[in-house]
Image (cartoon, helix red, strand yellow):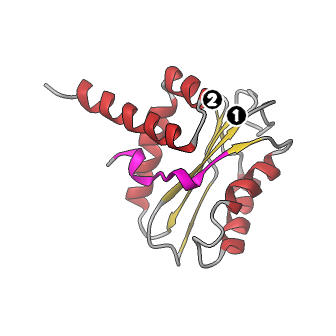
């Protein structure tokens, strides 16, 4: 299992928004036509944010929602181009990288694996820096592909 398996260039957005809500809306807009019920997903994402912030630190947020009618997991990537966004993260660092996860609610183990892989990738300062400099959606996906290859190589005996 690799993060890149859940990515798609059409689900990468370069943002220039002013608020967390605008960022979430822009990412959900990327899903238009890909989900049966985009509005229910939107409501689930905002409801989850009201419970507790998904700002995890290091300028990263991971908004997420799982729903009955989803068959597969996906990740929508948002890269904020200008000023970082207030996301109420623990470290108060403005968010510039957003990874929105959606998927079926009955596959908790897979969800936790995705979250773990994504968190490991995000901890890589070089990857975060390269993502912020990416010029295209394809480059974002390629950066995660390269990261997956690096990790696989480092685990070989």
Helix, strand or loop at mark 1: loop
Residue placed most toward the observer, 132 or 58: 132
Number of numbered tags placed on the structure image: 2
Asked where in the image residue 35 lies, by quadrant, the reply is bottom right
**Where residue 99 sits in the image (x, y, percent)?**
59, 46
Residue denoted by label 2: 132
Q: Position of residue 132 (x, y in %)?
A: 63, 29
Instruction: Report, in whole angstroms, how far the alpha carbon at label 2 lies from the one at label 1.
Output: 8 Å
Q: Residue furthest left?
A: 157
149 with respect to 122 (left or right): left
Name the residue located 43 percent from the left edge and 49 percent from the top edge.
114
34 in relation to 57, above or below: below
Q: Secondary structure at mark 2?
A: helix
Pointer 1: what residue?
Answer: 96
- The magenta stretch spans residue 39: no
The verdict on residue 8 being magenta is yes
Q: Nearer the viewer, mark 2 or mark 1?
A: 2
Residue 91 percent across, percent down from the top left: 70, 27
Stretch of the chain drawn in magenta: 2-13
Outermost residue toward the right in this view:
18
In the rendered structure, the answer to whether residue 153 lies left or right of residue 148 reads left
Locate the C terminus by quadrant.
Answer: top left
State which tag comes first along the sequence, 2 or 1: 1
68 lies left or right of 26: left
Please name the residue shown 72% across and 73% down the image: 39
């Amino acid at each position: 299992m690799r993060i890149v398996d859940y990515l798609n260039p059409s689900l990468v957005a370069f943002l220039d928004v002013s608020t967390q809500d605008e960022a979430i809306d822009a990412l959900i807009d990327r899903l238009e036509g890909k989900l049966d019920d985009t509005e229910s997903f939107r409501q689930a994402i905002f409801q989850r944010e009201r419970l507790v912030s998904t700002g995890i630190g290091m300028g990263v947020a991971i908004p997420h929602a799982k729903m009955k009618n989803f068959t597969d997991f996906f990740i929508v990537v948002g890269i904020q181009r200008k000023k970082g966004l207030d996301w109420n993260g623990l470290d108060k660092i403005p968010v510039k990288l957003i990874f929105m996860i959606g998927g079926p609610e009955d596959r908790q183990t897979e969800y936790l694996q995705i979250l773990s892989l994504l968190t490991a990738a995000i901890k890589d300062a070089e990857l975060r820096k390269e993502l912020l400099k990416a010029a295209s959606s394809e480059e974002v996906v390629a950066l995660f592909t390269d990261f997956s290859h690096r990790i696989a190589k480092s685990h070989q005996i």
